[in-house]
Image (cartoon, grey):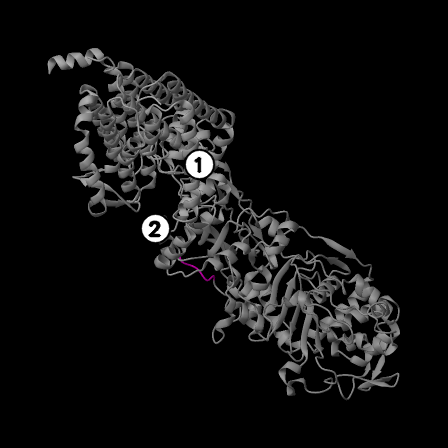
Amino acid sequence: MRGKLQRTWKIMDWPGLFLAAALIAFGVVIVKAATAGTRMAALGERQLFYGVSALSLLLLVLFISYEVWIEYSAIFYGICVLLLIIMPVVGHSVAGSKSWLSLGGYSLQPSEVAKVLAALACAGYIKDLENRTMEKRDFAILFGIIGLPMILTALQPDFGTATTFLPMFAAVFFVSGLELSKLAKWAALGLASVAILFAIGWFTFFRPYQKERVLTFLDPSLDPKGAGYQVMQAKIAVGSGQFTGKGLYSGTQNRLNFLPAPYTDFVFGVVCEETGFIGAGLLLALYMALLLRVVSAQELAKDPEGRFLAASAFFMLLYHILINTGMVVGLLPTTGIPLPFLSYGGSALFSMTMMVALALNVRMRRYSV
Amino acid sequence: MSPFGGGDFAPKAMVMKAMVYVAFGLLFARLFYLQVMRGDFYRQLSENNYTRSIVLRSPRGMILDRKGAVLCRNRISFSLVLDSSRQGNLEDTLSAMQRILGLCMTKEQVKAAQTRSAVPSLAVIARDVPTSWVEKVEARQSEMPLLTIEMEARREYPYGALLGHSLGYVGLISPEESEKLHIPITDPFIEVGKSGVERAANAMLMGKNGRRTAQVNSVGREVDNPNLRLPGVGIQEEPIPGKTVQLTLDVKLQAILEAAFGEESGSALFMNPATGEILAWVSMPEFDPNLFCGTISPTAWKTLSEDPRHPLLNRPIQGAYPPGSSFKPFVGLVGLEEGKLTPSTIYNCPGSWTFGGNVFHCWAKGGHGAVNLLTAIQNSCNVFFYKAANDIGIERIAKWGASFGLGKPTGVDIPGEGSGILPSPEWKALRHLGPWYPGETLPVGIGQGYLTVTPMQLLSFYSTLAEGGIRVKPHMVAGPTEILEKTPISESSIEIIKEGLWRVVNGGGTGKACHIDGLDVCAKTGTAQVIVGSAGKNTYSIEKEFRDHAWFAGFAPRKEPQVAFVIMVEHGGHGGDIAAKIAKAGLEYLFYGKEPSPEGQPAQAPAAPRRQDQSGTRDQARLDQGQGAGHAG
């Protein structure tokens, strides 16, 4: 045990650990600022607890080799899928979707955990390929591993969280050994199918509020008091922060309730308003550095499964960051995708921490022993 | 294709890095654009979000009578307003309003109220609501996010119906008034005077609203967070309260006169002939101006507007009647000045005079016999003045009438004044009524025919006579004397007419009912026909609505007159009866401080202020001194 600790200390990815820890701390501070003085003030305290837990989780995942995590993943993946199947019965409803499981005062979102476990399960399958070329069947199985929990999540129904499984498909393609030219083809095909799906959805299963979000994103003046209001208020929060920000706890958009969901989906608005271009730039720089660290983990990975884990972490991080910040700064329509490490909540924080930790883990253990 | 995870990974890593750089480059650019390039713009928008400009309403000034009695003051009143510029749901607000206040309103009604409102986003739902509502709205504001409570200063007229026509009332400003008075409509509660003194002295009475910038949250509730000291929050413009306006009116005289009127309709005016200060302005029946405060209820409006006695008519200036015999002294004066009459001119009155084939009657069937100017005024002989008018001619009567202010408004400060009709050949031609026939001059000589005057015009005439030809501008708002016209009249003519008027009251003439020991009252009765052919009949024997109008006009005392007066009782029969008695009551009060005994006639006691509760006086005083009444929500 002692020897193992010493070994981990020696191979520790200090820059990666620092970046992840800094982001978790950033999140604790901002959630506190976003909830101070409101009925939600207790959430700030709770986020501190989540942050400390996430930091412990980070260290725990780094401590044990990713190969071990992969080994045991299949069982947990199975349990998690079962949990998702029975969610409609045991879950409790938040905003119309049965996606939360109550655990003695705390709530757990199994779909968030399922992402990590699906990535690990895929890695396990990739390990069993033993460096042979991917066949269509292999693609189908990997997509099945990812797709099963994704569809179950979508059925809860929680489309926002379901879409966060999509980056893993990208990871499968990216690491599968396909040449870049073929990748481009697949990417084009993927985009086209998303567009077609969107078009079909628009006329069939999209709900009115979802259509409204898209329409008001395209033209916020359509509904300045309703859905367009959030878009506009978020922009005002961001812009009014100016270069240096209004100061922590002094954001008027945040403190006077103009900014919607200031501690969850629109937490980036609080960052921009209270810490200005400097603070938001610092946050983006941290994300960027972490992303590049994860890219290097992929490059240096000693095995395909490690490379896949790092790629999954990369696409997942990138997807969350872009969709969320893009929404807050008014470049993308409103969705319920949280900002990694910053949005209030334990489940998303833990799953993102685990993904990043696995990627760093892969980088740390890049030399075959 | 390479094995999974195999192949040359470097280009793929390059693509990934490129993705990061491009995406974050875009994000940085967007942040730079929003926060640095357009930062000032969005900072302003965020300030607009959390600041709300709150109107600090300035109360109108008080109105006092000549002795300082409060005729009009303000009280605090609360109104419900739906503010659609706030963040919140209209349906939720409306259903909560029904649940909490029992106030049922549809979206359409709100829209209609918004259309009516001067400020489009603000729909005034209810004015002057009970304080229990204010408490409920305050307590459960979150359920009714669009509903706000606004505080305003509401007009209150303690004497009620006693002063309806003189004080007038206020109402919400109309777009036309906004343009005319140069008052921008920045608040849905701007009130301006609609009639009476309220309108005449509006510029003085009205203050100027102030403004305060408050810090509000997203549901529009004012927050005072010591941690958030924000720029632009605080008082910016102090309200300027309206000035107190003093009137020349004597509310006690007014009360005595109105009591003397009883159930009769008509006018009574008392004025200082030298200064034009109006002491009493009676228009019976009166209305209670308190009914018009805020918004008059449809039933109250219907009752008032459909009342056959026309309580909304401001009779002293809007009622035009033939002056009847009260016009005769004027004809006598013109005759003297134009050399058509002398004090020794004698006409015989056999009871009628046939002129141009028509018979013109005197009211005395048997005639007055030989009459001169003095006895003709004293006994109000018609035949004398038929002949005098015929000798003088209509042009001269019209010319002198214009000098005495007939046929045009007297310029009194109370708005809405009529002109009456001062007939002349030109007037008739202008109206396309054909040429003037000499026979038409005769009825004008006794104040009938085409001639009509408002009570105010007749007062102006008697006042000018009392002052020897100096006509002043009548006014109810205290202020300097304004001389409108000086007509040169010989002293002797004036004295002859005054002697005639003195005899009417004191020489056993038609106005003896107004005789007061020790006071030389000069006055003339008038009995104006309402229907043709009633002359000579006993007017009390016919239906009231066809009975003659009764006039009693004059001044007192004879030397250095201090008051000129006109009493006009619609369908009051002879001017020497009720009209003279009303005048007497007023004069006895003015010169001897005598008030009619209250016993048996409780209505004659001066009306006491309606609200005498002491609890309200402190708030009252505060409001009246002009503390800003503002937002309470």
- State yes or no: residue B610 in magenta: yes
Three-letter amino acid code at disc 2?
Arg
Q: Which residues are magenta?
A: B609-613
Residue neighbourhood size for the residue with mark 2, other residues' Cα within 10 Å, grouped as few (<14), some (14–19), many (≥20): few
* Direction from residue B223 to residue B419 in the image, left or right: right
Residue at image mark 2: B140
Callout in the foreground (1, 2)? 1
In the rendered view, tell whether residue B58 sits above or below residue B576.
above
Image x and y of residue B417, in percent: 68, 62
Q: Position of residue B100 (x, y in %)?
A: 35, 57
Q: Main secondary structure of the magenta part?
A: loop
The residue carrying mark 1 is A192
Taking the image as drawn, is residue A301 in sight? yes
Question: Residue B522 is drawn in which quadrant?
Answer: bottom right
How crowded pointer 1 is (Cα within 10 Å; few <14, some 14-19, many 20+) is rated as: few
Q: Secondary structure at mark 1?
A: helix
- Which circle marks residue B586 in the picture? none
**Is the residue B301 above or below the residue B59 in the image?**
below
B231 vs A59: above or below: below
A72 inside magenta stretch: no
Instruction: Count the labels in the image.
Output: 2
- Residue A262: % across, % down: 35, 35
Residue at 78% across, 56% down = B485
Nearer-the-camera pick, A201 or B378: A201
Chain letter for mark 1: A
